[in-house]
């Protein structure tokens, strides 16, 4: 009888241990595993972005807007140094390129001088251009202006007013540096005997393009009345 009782007690103890293992270890671990599986199903797969490997690089747009870097740069009718200089551009001038070719940039549309003739455009060397606007100091600006008017009449006496009015006309867009290069600076007018008046041509060589300067008053006027 005692043996039977001991066997019963042993079986009850084993059953209690099994129940404890199931309740306190197996079931919680099973629930955690199931929760982890459910979470993985609900989490969306990561999407590839442009920064991820395997994506093609998006090319940056080509830079086509520049500034003249050199003090003076010739605009030529063909992309080579031997081509004729159509006009000049100056440090700080902004340019837009229509195309780039062998170290040159085209700054105009193509045009034809005569019927059946070749197409011609204006070109600048890329070596004379910069993506960033150059910083032009006041001293550098004065030296540039002084070069424009270096052959002015009575320069030593009226250099200050010549520089001031030249700078004004250029900034207003009334004149460009080529206008001053044409005459070398301000020319004394013989029409005004009793006043110190000088002139420059801007935009052409007709009487309508003639600009007068009274150096005593600083007045600029356009008609020789």
Image (cartoon, rainbow, N blue to C red):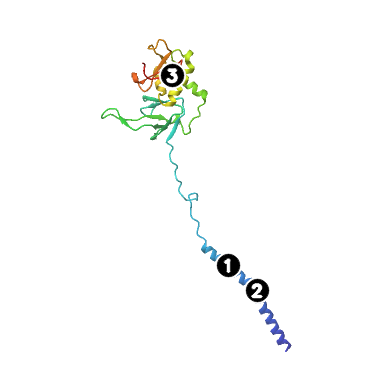
Quarter of the rendering occupied by the N terminus: bottom right
Would residue 9 be seen by someone viewing this image from the given angle?
A: yes
Instruction: Give the camera-side residue of 92 and 16.
Output: 92
C-alpha distance separating marks 3 and 1 = 93 Å
Q: Which of marks 2 and 3 is in front?
A: 3
C-alpha distance separating marks 2 and 3 = 108 Å
Residue at 73 percent of width and 87 percent of height: 2
Query: Considering the numbered disc 1 on the image, is that residue within a helix, a strand or a loop?
Result: helix
Where does the image place residue 212, in percent across and percent down from the top left? 40, 18
Which of the 4 quarters of the picture holds residue 175?
top left
Q: Mark 3 points at which residue?
A: 219
Q: Mark 1 points at which residue?
A: 33
Where does the image place residue 47, in percent across and percent down from the top left? 48, 55
Around disc 2, counting alpha carbons within 10 Å, would you say few (fewer than 14), some (14 to 19), or many (20 or more)?
few
Around disc 3, counting alpha carbons within 10 Å, would you say few (fewer than 14), some (14 to 19), or many (20 or more)?
few
Instruction: Give the camera-side residue of 57 and 199.
Output: 199
Contact (CB < 8 A) between labels 3 and 1?
A: no
Where does the image place residue 35, in percent across and percent down from the top left? 56, 66
- Which residue appears farthest toward the right when viewing the image? 2
C-alpha distance separating marks 2 and 1 = 17 Å
Q: Name the residue under label 2.
A: 21
Query: Considering the numbered disc 2 on the image, is that residue within a helix, a strand or a loop?
Result: helix
Does residue 18 lie above or below 101 as drawn?
below
Instruction: Give the camera-side residue of 222 and 99.
Output: 222
Residue at 62 percent of width and 70 percent of height: 28
């Amino acid at each position: 009888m005692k043996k039977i009782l001991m066997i019963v007690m042993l079986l009850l103890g084993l059953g209690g241990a099994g129940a404890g293992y199931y309740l306190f270890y197996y079931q919680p671990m099973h629930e955690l595993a199931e929760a982890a599986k459910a979470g993985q199903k609900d989490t969306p797969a990561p999407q590839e972005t442009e920064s991820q490997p395997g994506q093609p690089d998006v090319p940056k747009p080509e830079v086509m807007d520049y500034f003249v870097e050199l003090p003076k740069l010739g605009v030529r009718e063909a992309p080579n140094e031997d081509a004729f200089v159509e006009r000049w551009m100056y440090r700080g001038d902004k340019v837009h390129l229509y195309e780039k070719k062998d170290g040159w940039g085209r700054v105009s549309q193509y045009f034809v001088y005569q019927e059946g003739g070749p197409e011609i455009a204006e070109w600048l060397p890329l070596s004379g251009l910069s993506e960033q606007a150059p910083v032009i100091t006041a001293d550098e600006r004065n030296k540039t202006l002084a070069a424009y008017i270096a052959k002015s009449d009575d320069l030593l006496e009226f250099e200050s007013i010549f520089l001031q009015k030249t700078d004004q006309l250029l900034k207003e867009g009334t004149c460009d540096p080529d206008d001053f290069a044409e005459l070398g600076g301000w020319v004394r007018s013989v029409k005004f005997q009793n006043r110190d008046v000088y002139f420059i041509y801007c935009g052409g060589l007709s009487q309508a393009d003639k600009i007068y300067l009274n150096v005593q008053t600083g007045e600029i006027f356009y008609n020789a009345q």
